[in-house]
């Protein structure tokens, strides 16, 4: 995807340690655009997985490879749906229960395209983006394995 196309469609891809401003990111997708009829968002949060103590997780990634994967996922969404914009922000580093991890936001002339593209992007982020998660539990830290349910969710977009 070239810079001119990304600017015209308001594509934002970011891997960052700092938190994001949900309202500002959503507003940016429709600002000054009369062709936007729908903006759909998904915000992923760190949930407390352990009732017997506070939990946190550390997300790691491979710089360069991760951004390339996000670009490929975004490009595939752009070819499948008539989007006027999209935002993918994924945080890395140590995050506590309640912290925001990921933002997927899509804009389109019509809601159906925005909803479907957002679901596709999240399903593919879970299965194709190179992130590694290590959970902190009262019993110590452990790496999180890929889940079959994520693979099944992504499979609906193939073929």
Image (cartoon, rainbow, N blue to C red):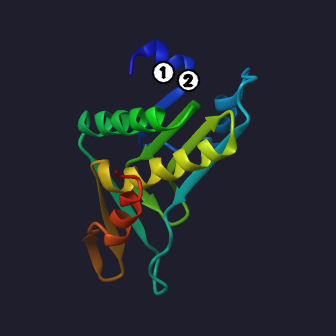
Q: Residue at x 48, y 41 (%)?
A: 89
Q: Nearer the viewer, residue 81 or 146?
A: 81
Q: Is residue 39 left or right of residue 10?
A: right
Residue 21 visible (yes or no): yes
- Residue at the image position 67 percent from the left and 35 percent from the top: 24
Q: CB under 8 Å between callouts 2 and 1?
A: yes
Tell me the element at label 2: loop
Residue 64 appears in which quarter of the rendering?
A: top left
Q: Residue at x 44, y 58 (%)?
A: 95
**Front position in the image: 80 or 14:** 80
Q: Residue at x 47, y 12 (%)?
A: 4
**Quadrant position of residue 73:** top left
The vertical placement of 10 against 88, above or below, is above
In-image side of 47 versus 153 (left or right): right
| Placement of the N terminus among the 4 image quadrants | top left
Give the residue number, with chain letter if any, for mark 1.
6
Q: Position of residue 88 (x, y in %)?
A: 48, 40
* Residue 9: mark: 2
Percent x, y of residue 154: 38, 58
Callout 1: SS: helix
Q: CA distance from mark 2 to mark 1?
A: 5 Å
């Amino acid at each position: 995807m070239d810079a001119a196309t990304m600017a015209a469609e308001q594509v934002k891809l970011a891997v960052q340690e700092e938190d994001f401003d949900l309202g500002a990111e959503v507003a940016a997708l429709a600002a000054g655009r009369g062709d936007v009829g729908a903006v759909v968002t998904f915000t992923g949060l760190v949930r407390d997985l352990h009732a017997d103590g506070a939990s946190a997780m550390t997300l790691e990634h491979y710089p360069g490879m991760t951004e390339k994967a996000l670009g490929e996922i975004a490009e595939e969404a752009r070819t499948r749906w008539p989007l006027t914009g999209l935002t993918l922000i994924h945080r890395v580093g140590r995050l506590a229960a309640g912290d925001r991890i990921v933002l997927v936001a899509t804009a389109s002339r019509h809601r159906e395209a925005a909803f479907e593209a957002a679901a596709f992007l999240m399903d593919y982020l879970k299965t194709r983006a190179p992130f590694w998660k290590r959970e902190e539990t009262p019993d110590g830290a452990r790496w999180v394995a890929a889940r079959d349910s994520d693979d099944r969710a992504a499979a609906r977009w193939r073929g």
